[in-house]
Amino acid sequence: MAKKIHSLEIAGTPVYIGQGVFGELQEHLDTKLATREVIFLLADENTIEHCYPVLISMVPQLEKANKIIIKAGEENKTLATCEKVWNQMAVEGANRQSLLINLGGGMVSDLGGFAASVFHRGMPFVNIPTSLMAMIDASLGGKTGVDLYSLKNQIGLFSKPSSVYIWPGFLSTLPHRQLLSGFAEMLKHALIADGAFWKKLTKIPMAVVSDWEDHILTAIQIKAKIVNKDPLENGIRRQLNFGHTLGHAFETYSLRNDASPLTHGEAVAMGMICEAYISYRSLGLDHAQRDELVRNILLNFTHYKIPTTAIDELVEITHYDKKNRKGRLMLTLIRDIGKAVEGQQCELALVRESLFRYTDFSRHIPRE
Ligand code: GLY
């Protein structure tokens, strides 16, 4: 029996989802191999150990690919790591006809997509996301880039992968914290666009979800609908940034201060708590919905404790947010669960207030 496969298009890129995706990848590789192009495979030290063996058991041609292995972790999503990738590609004869396969989470697809896109003014790449976060968000939609002095994604470009292959089986290799990180983005997709999906996701704690494929498909369909209307993020695509302005501030703060920093999703989850508060104060989000949001996030995520003395640093980090216009902080907020509004100007005083409230939110939210 043929293995199940779903396909859709995001900003002109074919995206395949399901058990049978590697048949599609094989066809893509056959075309490259027929013309003897060099194929590179970028992985980090975790995905080369846990995902690469699974991949070559299903796509044996990939054993011949030139492997480039980088250190895992957001702290390595830098130009210095790109330089190593470019050096190896140059030494091993990469050119504009070669192909880079990014096997990994968001760090690998962001960095690999960027490295390929500027090498020889643009070498094609495909993404094989291995984390939940990359499957439903980072590997899709053409955002590529690296961090600068621990500020997120400051250097990069929009550049489309040739195709994306999502095989949910990789999730069984993922540590719980990484799964949780992707779950935050999934909750965000629901919060901005699909109240029914939110209800489905919050019915049971994430730890007991066993079949991810349907959730992944729904989350990707939400992203596709938004990105296809606005691939270069001039308007509605900003909705996907709900929770991310404060989330990036938590993430940068944590990268600077913690031995074991927050994952991207953990930071976004905390960002959504603050931005829900701002939505309540400035966009009329009903307080019962705000509390429902906070309660469900805290059901899955540990409340990240910050001292009140950290608030100035967090507010200062929000100044570097790419969505700001003319020095003004611009946020995506939610009017209701399932209805986001982008481009909302926000006073720094309200950001500060949300962070003060955040420091003791868990005491204010009634348990059900
Ligand atoms: N991760 C948000 C976006 O792709 O626009």
Image (spheres, helix red, strand yellow):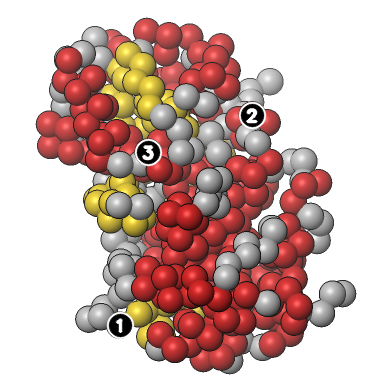
| Labelled disc at residue 76 | 3
Task: Read off the residue under disc 2.
Answer: 173
Q: How many marks?
A: 3
Vertical relation: 145 (above or below) 97: below
* Residue 72 falls left or right of residue 148: right
How packed mark 2 is, by other alpha carbons closer than 10 Å (few <14, some 14-19, many 20 or more), is some
Q: Residue at x 61, y 76 (%)?
A: 358
Q: Position of residue 223 (x, y in %)?
A: 48, 57
- Across and down, in percent, residue 232 comes to 29, 61
Q: Report x, y in % for residue 85.
A: 26, 27
Task: Tell me the SS state at disc 2.
Answer: helix
Counting residues from the start of the chain, the first of labels 3 and 2 encountered is: 3
In terms of image quadrants, where is residue 260?
Answer: top right
Please identify the quarter of the rendering in which residue 54 is found: top right
- CA neighbours of label 3 inside 10 A, class few (<14), some (14 to 19), many (20+): some
Quadrant containing the N terminus in the rendered view: top right
Instruction: Tell me the kind of residue under disc 1.
Output: Arg
| Residue 171 placement, left or right of 24 | right
Rounded to the nearest angstrom, the CA distance separating label 2 from label 1 is 42 Å
**Amino acid at dot 3:** Asn
In the structure shown, which secondary structural element does the residue marked by tag 1 occupy? Answer: loop
Q: Residue at x 17, y 15 (%)?
A: 91
Q: Amino acid at mark 2?
A: Thr
In the picture of the structure, the residue carrying the numbered disc 1 is: 328
The numbered mark, 3 or 1, whose residue comes first in the sequence reads 3
Residue 363 visible in this rendered orientation of the protein: yes
Q: Residue furthest left?
A: 120
Mark nearest the camera among 2 and 1 is: 1
Mark 3 or mark 2, whichever is nearer to me: 3
Residue at x-position 42% and y-position 13%:
62
| Disc 3 element | helix
State how far apart marks 3 and 1 are (Cα): 30 Å
